[in-house]
Amino acid sequence: MNVAEWLAATARVRPSAPALLTGFDLDADYKTFARRSAAIASALPRDYGIAPGDRVALFSTNCTQYLECLYGIWWMGAVAIPINAKLHGREAAWICSDAGAKLALVSDDTVEALVEAKGDLPEGMRTLSVESQAYRALREGEGARQPVEREVDDLAWLFYTSGTTGRPKGVMLSHGNLVAMTMCYLADVDHATPNDASLYAAPISHGAGLYNFPHVRTGGRHVIPESRGFDPDEVLNLGRQLDNVVMFAAPTMVRRLVDAARRRGVHGEGIRTIIYGGGPMYLADIRDAIATMGQRFVQIYGQGESPMTITALSREWHGHTDHPRYLERLASVGTAQSVMSVRITGRDGELLPPGETGEVEAKGTAVMLGYWNNPQANAETLKDGWLRTGDVGRLDEDGFLTLSDRSKDVIISGGTNIYPREVEEALLTHPDVREVSAIGVPDPDWGEIVVACVVLEQGIAGDDAKLDAHCLASIARFKRPKRYVYLDALPKNNYGKVLKTELRQMMRK
């Protein structure tokens, strides 16, 4: 099936229900939402030569047009490539090129970044700003009443995620994967009703956007904050006035929201559910959040390769304070979601019993089709249908998963993955830098910050501003180190591998 059929169905049975809002202002009801998406679907082949299966990039900050475009792309059978709007233009251009995108839908605040990187864009790719008059004219047309038919294994969402081995990898998510994820949401995470207001305070290009589906299917409201991002006071005000607000948030966002609620003497009234994930939530922080805002939290653990769907810790378990192992359960990431199986394996791939620590593996209908044009990564990551997550954890005898480490050394800052290799490669192109290792160091506001441990060429003095400027020329601002530490040498093992564990220990002294 085509996931756009959910929008078409809701528009038929709830045409006047409010659908898209910016702040408190209504942009479209469901009839208008569906008509605009159908018009976009009609214009893509007519004006831009897009055919079913072609890739269309979305490089935009959050706005109601984002959702119109997503459904327009799917309506005509094409593939959406949501790209983090914080990326450097060259990084976004590389993704467009790797995916073979024919069109990039951008916002006014991202278009210039692509223009500056035009030499890296695929030949013939065009751009269209969703804030332009041309876009507004395009979406006001008419289109097919029904989305084109797609099979469950047809590609729908191409999500670019990185590993520690260099370039981003395109995770291929099918219509069937997205349906499975949505069913997990309804079974394991939260219910969805026509009265809900799904608040997109985190990027639509990532987890927050993936959670649009249950609310489209049930005819709920989709709310973009006027700030287009996360402002805790704005979120609290929206919750109080919109009511039945549901939102996805990184743990760092939860901490900021809790601080704002405590400062204002409120408890998050009107916010029904906060789904948190995308990084480690420390036990003290979730206990503080519950004490301040009450039982409105659900935790999910997933990856781009199994979007939002590996495990979940339900609202019930957050409130099950009378259980003798309550704190242990609260520190876990819950149990396998409904379409998933989870296991722990050892170094040789052997199955480990409950209580033993090893690599987390997951299998089920939410797991990706594979990586785009990357058979080597597929072979390394998918084994007999099992997804090797690269995360380390243990299962207890009741199936609760507790994560203990991230074997891939990914730094999670503000809920966003930052991959050390990208930072290291950027810095190593500076003539003053001989060696570098980027690590994540705990931070109360960001979860982790990037610290670059740098060995300079002989006779060169450290200059943070110079290295900062060099980083900003090639990678996104949020990836650049927040701190530079200058060392005479990096600690290494007998094989010459940098010992990041020792570096992390040094930073904590």
Image (cartoon, rainbow, N blue to C red):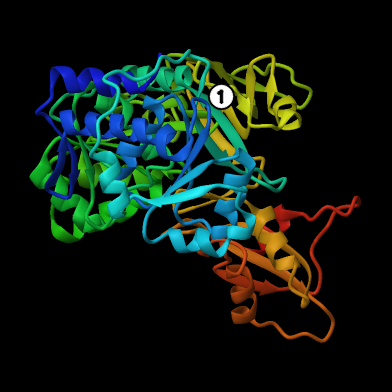
Question: Taking 461 as reference, is 356 above or below it?
Answer: above
Name the side, left or right, on which 441 lies relative to 72: right
- Left or right: residue 456 versus residue 123 is right
For the point 60% across and 39% down, which residue is it?
99
Q: Residue 64's spot in the image, x, y percent?
A: 26, 44
Give the left or right position of residue 252, taking residue 144 as reference: right
How crowded pointer 1 is (Cα within 10 Å; few <14, some 14-19, many 20+) is rated as many
Q: Is residue 128 above or below residue 451?
A: above
Q: Foreground residue, 228 or 504?
A: 228
Say which element carries label 1: loop
Q: Position of residue 284 (x, y in %)?
A: 38, 47
Disc 1 target residue: 368
Instruction: Inspect the image, locate mark 1, and give the three-letter code of the amino acid beneath it.
Output: Met
Residue 182: image quadrant is top left
Which of the two residues, 210 or 55, is positioned nearer the viewer here? Answer: 55
Quadrant in which the N terminus appears = top left
Q: Residue furthest right?
A: 494
Foreground pick, 362 / 2:
2
- Residue 64 appears anywhere in the view: no
- At 37% from the left and 21% from the top, the residue drawn is 3
- The tally of labels here is 1
Residue 387 image offset from top left, x and y in percent:
62, 23
The percent position of residue 245, horizontal first and vertical second, equals: 19, 38
Pick the quarter of the image with the C terminus: bottom right
Within the image, what quadrant is residue 205 found in? top left
* Res 69 quadrant in image: top left
Query: What residue is shown at x 35% (from left), y 47% (from top)?
Result: 202
**Residue at image coords 26%, 58%:** 227
